[in-house]
Image: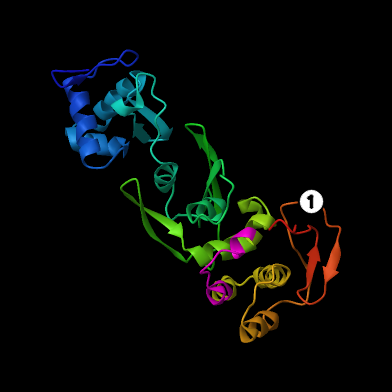
Amino acid sequence: MIKSGIYLTENRKSLSKTESYLLSKLSEDGREIFTIKDTADVLQKSYVQSRKIISNLKAKRWIEKIEAGKYLIMPLSAGVKPKYTEHEFVIGSKLIEPYYIAYWSALNYYHLTEQIPFSVFIATTKRKSNRKILDVDYLFVTLSKQKFFGYSTVNIAGKNILISEKEKTIADCLDHPEYCGDITEVAKALKAEGLSFRKIVDHAKKMGNATILKRLGYLSEILDIKLDEELKKTMLKNISKGYSVLDPSIKSRKGKYNEKWKLLINRKIGEEL
């Protein structure tokens, strides 16, 4: 219940007027994830005073620490035993800059996979250790600046989030199948309607990894996906002479060699696709 502007629940201690104002103001401004500096700005208090207030709120179970200096508001809608979390993509967007949601997470967002990943994959140009926040694993993949492109803004839970565009998601997953489950998940995604294979090829060339084109060419043939002949010629022209492995997500390096696409076929792509 609410009493004189102070929140009360069975398992969370009541808020002072200052604490209540802080959480209300942050929520009103859309800052459900906030920092110590945000607290100091809203309350016009010192850094030390703000840290003390945050410590009290955490002890009262009204906020959750997601990483050093960053906190998540646990609202009334979370119930008396709060297990609420902001959308995992929103939390992920606050963990590092620059970033974009990528790989298996992006495949799932575009409904290009039936599997539900239990982790959030985040592409960045920086190095950051993986972490678990509120039972969700956040996995950071460091990319070169050459590969860090092809993302756009989407609105999720009222927040603007950067996520790889559909064709860039495919290119990224062909680049690193191990970050989307395995190569079979990419194969399934390639059968979706409306994909621009020319865009995928253009992204692969810009990324500078000929293996993407090898995997794309091989999969398109076994899946009976009809590619424009000129596009296929461009792909063959840009592949390297050395052999690459089809699926790096598995340790086995046994299989047949596909001479056309210069691939070691270490995984059979099933007919169920």
How busy is the neighbourhood of tag 1: few (under 14 within 10 Å), some, or many (20 plus)? few
Q: Classify residue 89 as left or right of residue 44.
A: right
> In the displayed image of the protein, which residue is found farthest to the top?
10
Verify whether residue 255 appears in magenta.
no
With 74 as the anchor, is 195 left or right in this view? right
- Whether residue 206 is visible, yes or no, is yes
Image-quadrant location for residue 17: top left
Residue 23 appears left or right of 262: left
Residue 187's image quarter? bottom right
Depth check: give the residue in front, 49 or 214: 214
Give how far across and how far down residue 139 sits, in percent. Answer: 55, 45
195 inside magenta stretch: yes
Q: Foreground: 257 or 62? A: 257
Q: Residue at x 39, y 19 (%)?
A: 81
- Relative to 135, say whether 164 is above or below: below
Closest to the observer, 122 or 221: 221
User: Looking at the image, which residue sits at the far front?
Assistant: 272
Q: Which residue is most to the bottom?
A: 230
The picture places residue 95, in percent across and down from the top left corner, at 43, 44
Question: x and y percent of residue 254 in the render?
Answer: 86, 58
- Which portion, as a residue range, is magenta? 188-201
Name the amino acid type tagged 1: Lys
- Is 173 located above or below residue 30 in the figure? below
- Label 1 secondary element: loop
* Quarter occupied by the N terminus: top left
Which picture quadrant has residue 271?
bottom right
Residue at position x 53%, y 61% from top? 169
Above or below, 109 against 208 in this view is: above
Q: Write down the residue under mark 1.
A: 251
Taking the image as drawn, is residue 75 in sight? no
User: Is 245 on the left or on the right of 75, as rendered?
Assistant: right
